[in-house]
């Protein structure tokens, strides 16, 4: 009777310098020529890249292992569809570049495994890791850089999204630099303190890492702490009339305050809102970097545009969903609110937006960021925006308009205004009415209106006072962002201004939030006029800018509307 076959993991009782698994060794010797000690046991390489989480990048370790077995290429570590498909492009790119891979089983692990990996940025590091695991190049140079790039089938390196967060992660992680596509080099160079290696082809990357032909690091342009801007295509001089509204928008731009314009159709609400960015102050370099990171992770940076120099202006349609406005979806992408960071979010026809869409704005407007919690990730996006909204006074558009008859019944006017909730209105600093433009203002051959440069100069002067005021407060750039703890310190009122504010709060029933926003608005008015403290004229203007807060405003003007049905 034949002797029983021992299991593979049965150790030998006599070691004597040999293997403790003689049966397994016998099987290997029967399959492969040569002694077991000469076999290549460890064929493992590690390369670092980055995965996007929100607007930040997390360092990802690409582990590439080659083992005996049937030829197979597998990618693990929670890869998304494009990452799983990368194995096909990597193999084709390596073959078409002239590298012959051994016929082995290749496993790529993207660690940490609990972070979702998206996009094609892992293809360049995976290809370099495969070459290092196959002992076609040394692994040591790979540990000095973070790598990112998409590969074409012939080995050319294509641009990717999220290069600026990748460069930030390289600096914070202590790496020498990043190796990125040539088209993304200028974006990566915005982060100082690291080396940026622009690469066009996979062979260039290999030749640099092996020392055959070193790459020339990207030369940074002279550093500027302020993002220069080009002349605005839209100018305030294009808008005829509406001097009071222009002054109110100047006030909003100077302090970063939210605005609602209520007026009849054709009174210039949309024209004024679209020209508001032309009078906003120039972004600082820090603000521009924050905005650029958001646009970088979404791939919205224009060609040859490394830095966002203009303040963003976003004007979504009123059919937008709540996830489209504040962000969300399965991948928790930024919404229009975050895309308008340090810029303007314009909501035209405000009452036409769905109520649930408007209500999700309340917390982000107050805090300046939006936190999105999903099953597989939690991300936070910044959203310090100037909310500018426009609406008609009623469904027909002519309620309380001199010379025009309103065809809406009284209850329809109230229902129309009720679509914008009180808590949302409480977060608006300036609510004002626009009037129809007179014929003589439209027909003038020469408008004689002040250009945007005039308003922008005054706004810059006011913002400079605010930068000096908040120099020791990181993250605060203007009066509208001032937290309550600084309100009493900086908002010093004259005796008449204090009395006037007290009467307004009592008479109009203003909330504590409205009280604080009036103080911030009055402080901005004092900055524009160069006042050392808040005077009564500053408080009076700030109170006048909150017309929709006043009790009985609609009731006092409903004589222009038709009475409702019995």
Image: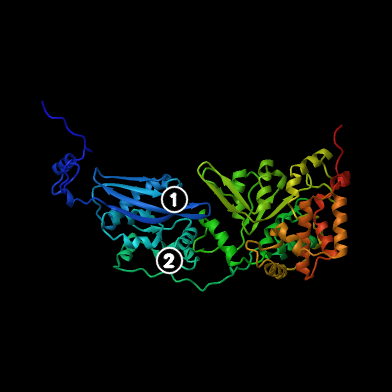
Which residue does the numbered mark 1 point to in the structure image? 119
x, y (%) of residue 207? 31, 64
Q: Which mark is residue 196?
A: 2
What element does badge 1 sit on? loop
Can residue 245 be seen?
A: no
**Callout 1 crowding tier (Cα within 10 Å): few <14, some 14–19, many ≥20:** many
Outermost residue, left side: 1
x, y (%) of residue 411? 82, 38
The tag earlier along the polypeptide, 1 or 2, is 1
Outermost residue, top side: 1
What residue is at 30 percent from the left and 49 percent from the top?
65
> Above or below — where is 522 with respect to 421?
below
**Callout 2 crowding tier (Cα within 10 Å): few <14, some 14–19, many ≥20:** many
x, y (%) of residue 543? 82, 57
Foreground of the two, 14 or 155? 14
> Hey, which quadrant is residue 128 in on the image?
bottom left
x, y (%) of residue 446? 76, 68
Is residue 111 found left or right of 542 in the rendered image?
A: left
Foreground of the two, 164 or 110? 110
Quadrant in the picture for the N terminus: top left
**Alpha carbon distance from label 1 to label 2:** 21 Å
Quadrant in the picture for the C terminus: top right
- Report the mark closest to the observer, 1 or 2: 2
Is residue 563 found left or right of 290 in the rendered image?
A: right
Can residue 554 be seen?
A: yes
């Amino acid at each position: 009777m034949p002797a029983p076959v021992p299991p593979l993991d049965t150790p030998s009782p006599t070691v004597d310098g040999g293997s403790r698994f003689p049966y397994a060794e016998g099987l290997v010797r029967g399959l492969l020529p040569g002694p077991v000690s000469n076999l290549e046991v460890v064929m493992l390489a590690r390369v670092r890249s980055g995965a996007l989480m929100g607007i930040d990048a997390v360092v990802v370790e690409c582990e590439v292992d080659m083992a005996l077995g049937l030829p197979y290429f597998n990618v693990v570590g929670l890869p998304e569809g494009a990452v799983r498909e990368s194995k096909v492009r990597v193999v084709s790119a390596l073959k078409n570049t002239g590298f012959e891979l051994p016929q082995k089983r290749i496993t790529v692990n993207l660690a940490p495994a609990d972070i979702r990996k998206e996009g094609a940025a892992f293809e360049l590091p995976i290809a370099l890791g495969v070459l290092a695991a196959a002992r076609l190049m040394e692994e040591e140079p790979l540990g000095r850089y973070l790598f990112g790039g998409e590969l074409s089938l012939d080995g050319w390196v294509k641009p990717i999204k999220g290069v600026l967060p990748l460069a930030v992660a390289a600096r914070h992680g202590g790496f020498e630099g990043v190796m990125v596509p040539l088209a993304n080099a200028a974006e990566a160079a915005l982060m100082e303190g690291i080396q940026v290696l622009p690469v066009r082809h996979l062979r260039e990357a290999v030749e640099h890492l092996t020392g055959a032909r070193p790459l020339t690091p990207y030369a940074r342009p002279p550093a500027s702490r302020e993002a220069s801007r080009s002349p605005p295509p839209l100018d305030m001089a294009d808008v005829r009339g509406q001097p009071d509204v222009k002054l109110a928008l100047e006030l909003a731009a100077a302090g970063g305050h939210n605005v609602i314009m209520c007026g009849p159709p054709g009174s210039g609400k949309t024209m004024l809102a679209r020209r508001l960015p032309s009078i906003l102050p120039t972004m600082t370099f820090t603000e521009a970097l924050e905005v650029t990171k958001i646009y970088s992770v979404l791939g919205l940076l224009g060609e040859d545009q490394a830095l966002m120099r203009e303040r963003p202006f976003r004007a979504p349609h009123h059919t937008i969903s709540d996830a489209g406005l504040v962000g969300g979806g399965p991948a928790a992408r930024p919404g229009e609110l975050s895309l308008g960071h340090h810029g303007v979010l314009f909501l035209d026809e405000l009452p036409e937006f769905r109520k649930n869409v408007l209500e999700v704005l309340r917390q982000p407007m107050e805090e300046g960021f939006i936190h999105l919690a999903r099953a597989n990730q939690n991300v936070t996006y910044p959203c310090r925006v100037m909310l500018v909204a426009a609406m008609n006074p009623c469904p027909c558009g002519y309620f309380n308009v001199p010379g025009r008859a309103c065809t809406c019944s009284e209850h329809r006017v109230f229902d129309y205004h009720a679509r914008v909730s009180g808590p949302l209105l409480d977060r608006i600093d300036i609510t004002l009415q626009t009037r129809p433009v007179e014929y003589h203002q439209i027909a003038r051959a020469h408008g004689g209106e002040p250009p945007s440069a005039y308003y922008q100069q005054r706004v810059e002067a006011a913002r400079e006072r605010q930068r000096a005021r908040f120099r020791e407060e990181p993250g605060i750039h203007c009066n509208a962002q001032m937290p309550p703890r600084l309100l009493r310190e900086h908002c010093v009122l004259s005796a008449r201004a204090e009395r006037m504010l007290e009467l307004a709060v009592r008479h109009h029933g203003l909330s504590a939030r409205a009280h604080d926003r009036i103080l911030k608005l009055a402080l901005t008015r004092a900055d524009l006029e160069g006042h050392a403290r808040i005077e009564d004229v500053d408080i009076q203007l700030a109170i006048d800018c909150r017309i929709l807060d006043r009790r009985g405003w609609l009731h006092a003007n409903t004589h222009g509307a038709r009475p409702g049905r019995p």
